[in-house]
Amino acid sequence: MKMPKVNIKNLFAGLILVGSASFVSAQTTQVDSANSTATQTAATQQNPTIEGLKKQIEANPKDTEALAQLANAYQEASDWTNAVETWKKISVLLPDWAPSYYSQAYAYQSAKDDANAKIAYEKYVAAVKPEEVEQNKKNLAYAYFYIAFSEQQTDPNKAKEHIAKSLQYDPNNQDAIKLSKALNS
């Protein structure tokens, strides 16, 4: 499998920061997505970095490094729709590359699309290879936390399993500890 030329250390550092979101951000709120999408699209159309990367990808649609840079640029611009679509393209090109699923989940979560965020976090958990677990502990802990949080009402037993996994990877996460206590009380 050909890996992208993305600086993996920097990407993982960024993903760990993304994964350190708190319990509060796992809660859901409704937003006016039509207004939000129109504003994001206008902002990204004026972004020279995004426009340059789009041209680069037009010339080589399988350039995973440029696609990852574009997805990150969309995230920086809070253009969650285009970020998700770009991360999906990377997942098609590199189906075993776990960070693309984690980033998809983050973009979905930021767009308040909780159902798809949960699915993407589940794909991330499944894609992390055993030899990658150590470097992904924080992200795994957050992914399992988010899944548990999402399932607490519909499937409390599954939520308990997921929160236990979350705490296995990060036993000091206070939000996960609180959710575990709530689920097991």
Image: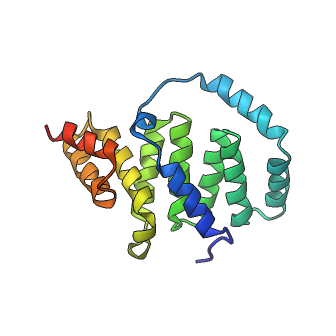
Q: Quadrant of residue 10?
A: bottom right
Image x and y of residue 43, in percent: 78, 35
**Left or right: where does residue 126 sit relative to residue 14?**
left
Image x and y of residue 178, in percent: 26, 40
**Left or right: where does residue 114 sit relative to residue 6?**
left
18 to 127, vertically: above or below: above
> Along the line of sight, which residue is nearer the eye, 21 or 113?
21
Q: Tell me the quadrant of the picture where the C terminus can be found.
A: top left
Q: Residue at x 55, y 23 (%)?
A: 31
Image x and y of residue 167, in percent: 28, 54
87 to 126, vertically: above or below: above
66 to 132, vertically: above or below: above
> Along the line of sight, which residue is nearer the eye, 137 or 126?
137
Q: Residue at x 59, y 53 (%)?
A: 88
> Along the line of sight, which residue is nearer the eye, 125 or 25?
25
Q: Residue at x 40, y 62 (%)?
A: 137
Image x and y of residue 41, in percent: 75, 34
